Image (cartoon, helix red, strand yellow):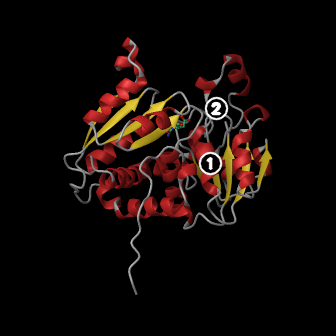
Amino acid sequence: MAQVIKIFKLKNIISIKDFEREDIDYILDEASKLENIALSKEISEELKGKILGMMFFEPSTRTRLSFETAMKRLSGKCIGFEDSVSSSVSKGESIADTAKMFEGYSDALVIRHELEGVSKFISDIVNVPVINAGDGAGQHPTQTLLDLYTIKKELKSIDNIKIALIGDLKFGRTVHSLANALTLYDNIELYLVSPPELKMPQEILHDLDKKEMSYTEVSNINEIIDKVDVLYVTRIQKERFGDINDYLKIKGAYVINKKMLEGRKLIVMHPLPRIDEIDTDVDDTKYNKYFTQAANAVPVRMAILKTLINNNPK
Ligand code: NCD
């Protein structure tokens, strides 16, 4: 029988909505093959001589460091800045000019910005692959890929899961991307748990409706905790509130603790950073998968970088 050669079609990773299920499968399969290199058990020179340009206009710890680790584990190098203050944008340079310059220096760009659509804008003006590492309250597609990788590893399947997205569903870009991605899987039971002020935006609900994916919106965790395999918890996105008093009213709305979880068969995920929405007493329990999830960022981002850079040589 002829061997089926799988290919990854996307040049840029801007929105998870650009992915078909086979594109996600491709990255998850590649990531699992790269685990030994991510864990430093094997050495790879797959991206030797390649440079990743990192333009982080908004703060980041995990995303930036895991992209950097991923590049270095494949023997590539990184250049870039960690905030707008340390880039020439603070002198008044346009984002377009900064991006054109980075294009000349690197083989792919990773961009985080507080405005939705910035990565897409840059992908239209440069020739190297562009990866969206979070655009405002928009999308965070590479986080979703590592979230799906974690779910698949922990639960053996993404189809047929029961999952609750909890917290700031209005401003949280990780839950926007994840909700969109789940529409590609079969028989998902989806619960959207948030205070009324922070409900999932209509635009995402409309996407779910279009894909005929049903969901249940609730504001009380107790209504769903018995029903789910995954609690995907997020922080309230303080920096995206126009009025700090609105944030203060909602702060601490949900706190998951060990007592609530005992005797249940579920896992707790969180894209991190955590503020107070998961009590630290959960950290030493079998429910905690958030640190594993953060570690999974490395093989998944290795798979992304390897695929995009090798598929799109300069
Ligand atoms: C998330 C983000 O930046 O959107 N963090 C991350 O990338 N792991 C979540 C958050 O900031 O709350």
Above or below for 67 versus 310: above
Characterize the local packing of mark 2: few (<14), some (14-19) or many (20 or more) Cα atoms within 10 angstroms.
Answer: many
Residue matched to label 1: 232
Above or below for 63 versus 241: below
Residue 265: x and y in percent read 65, 61
Amino acid type at circle 2 is Ile
Amino acid type at circle 1 is Tyr
Residue 150: x and y in percent read 51, 56
Seen from the viewer's position, the closer of residues 115 and 78 is 115
Residue 136 in view? yes
Tell me if 124 is positioned left or right of 238 in this view. left
Residue 189: x and y in percent read 72, 59
Location of the N terminus by quadrant is bottom left
Residue 289 in view? no
Q: Is mark 1 within 8 Å of ligand 1?
A: no
Above or below for 224 versus 30: above
Q: Residue at horizontal 76%, vertical 56%?
A: 214
Seen from the viewer's position, the closer of residues 117 and 220 is 117
Badge 2 marks a residue whose secondary structure is loop
Q: CA distance from mark 1 to mark 2?
A: 13 Å
Badge 1 marks a residue whose secondary structure is strand
Tell me if 167 is positioned left or right of 37 in this view. right
Characterize the local packing of mark 1: few (<14), some (14-19) or many (20 or more) Cα atoms within 10 angstroms.
Answer: many
- Which picture quadrant has residue 158? bottom right
